[in-house]
Structures are given as structure tokens and as C-alpha cells.
Image: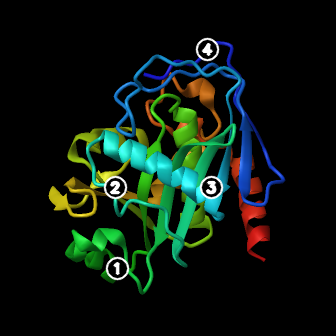
Amino acid sequence: MLGVHPKAAAPKRKPDVGANTIISIDGQSVLQPMCANPLGDALNSVQMAQQKFKIRLTRDTEHAHSANLLIRKMYSWRGYETHSSTVKHAPNNICLSVFSAEQAIGTLTLGIDSAEGLAASTLYPCEIEQLRTQGRVLCEITKLAVDPSISSRNVLASLFHIAYIHARQLNNCTDILIEVNPRHVPFYQRMLGFRQVGDERQCPRVKAPAVLLRLETDYVEIQLRKFGGLMDQAKEETSLYPYSFSPNDEAGIIQRLLRDRQ
């Protein structure tokens, strides 16, 4: 489990002037990588003191290249096919990356449902169409990777929170979908509250088994209002939500993203 120093203060979140930077995080806590992290088990016990990182929209070629290198590194290490697992710019895709010292340490792509459909529709067309007929507004997380040597709950929670803001607050999505390896299902259930909605099938994109999970954004909002920014409750709460942004931080991020859209 992640260790938090007893005297650790919550990380300082502040806007960054970089054109593609959503927020800069200047951590004061001493963090240790998670054990049994499906996004990359730590090879060594690494402590991150005075952790600093930025979350950016991956728009330019240089940042996309760094994100792609990280994806290929993590996917190949897990034995997944990497040919189609690259960051690609598309109208319905929002690519987010975490950078520390200009090195990509985490990335994900949020795909908003559109006429082009969702990547998960290849394996789960009936499950996804059923949600659509119920009036659900869907999005999906793909190309999720976090560097194993420095992955922490703070990094992953912050990255997911920004994705949630884009999903619910900016695009009115009611549900977040993700395809994961079956052995990682308990992690997503325990840490974020995902529920399984599709049985195990073989994913042709990465040539590995996959399971479809669903997370309602209503549930995420409740958890964020309850735990967001309250790292002092991390010992009692096993999910990632205490490591997320506080409601005030979230409001500031939303306002910045809305200004950038104008």
C-alpha cells in the first residue's frame, strides 16, 4: 500500500502558465509506489520527496511522442501488442499526460462517444448500445499508462480527476467505460468504484484478454465531494479519492479549461 508520512501536507495545486498545462502540483509529502499496481508494479521501492508534476493536454508532437514512448514501454513490458496503442489526435479524443521534469510519467486518452463510436464497441457492441438506448452519455478511457518506478496514488488520482472533469463537467457524460485485463479488475473496483458490465473477451488491439468496466460519473462526484483533497483520511479510505483535488481546486480547473475553450 501507499505510505504517507504522518506529517505530510496535502500537495499544493496551482495553475501553470504553459499553453497546454492544466495544473502544476508541488507535493510536500513523501510518497511510495503502490504495491500490486496493475498500471506497472514498482521494480524498486522508490520514495518521492517534494514530488512535482504537471498535467497537460497532449497537443503538440513532442508531448505526444513522450506519451507514446511511455505507452509502448508499459504495454510491451506487460506483453501487450503496441502497434495500435499510440496517442492519436481526433475530434472526440482528449489526451492527457503527466510530466515530471519534462519526462512523461503517466498518460491516458479520454474518448467521448460520437459518430465514430468507441474503441470498446469492437468487443462489446451490444453492451454499449444498450447503455445508449437507456439515454446514457458515454465516454471511455484508453491508452492508460503510468511509469512503474514513480507511480503513486497522487499521480493516478490527479490524472483520473482531470479526465472526470472533461467527461462530466465539460461533456455531460454519465458513464466512463474502460477495458482492462481480467487480473486488474479488483484494482479498478476497489480504487475507483468501477463495476463489470461485460464478460472476458480477447482484445485484438493489444492481443490480450479484456473485461469491460463501467463507472457512473454520479458516483464519482459523490466520492469527490466526500473525500477530494482530504489526504489525512487516506489511511481509513482505501480508494484513490482522498488523493484527488479538493472541490475548490476542481472549480478552478474547470474555469481554466472553459477559458481555454473560448
Name the element at disc 4: loop
Q: Which residue is mark 4?
A: 5
Q: Is residue 129 above or below residue 183?
A: below
- Mark 2: secondary structure: loop
Q: CA distance from mark 3 to mark 4?
A: 32 Å
Inter-mark Cα distance, 4 to 1: 45 Å
Residue 78: quadrant of the picture: top left
Tell me which label, 1 or 3, sits earlier in the chain: 3
Inspect the image, locate mark 2, and give the three-letter code of the amino acid beneath it: Thr
Name the N-terminal-most of marks 4 and 2: 4
Give me the residue at 34% from left, 79% from top.
132
Position of residue 137 measured from the top left corner of the image (x, y, whole percent): 44, 75
Label 3 amino acid? Answer: His
Residue lying furthest right in this view? 17
Q: In this rendering, is residue 77 above or below 212?
A: above
Residue at numbered disc 1 = 132
* Label drawn at residue 82: 2
Q: CA distance from mark 1 to mark 3?
A: 34 Å
Relative to 155, is 202 above or below?
below
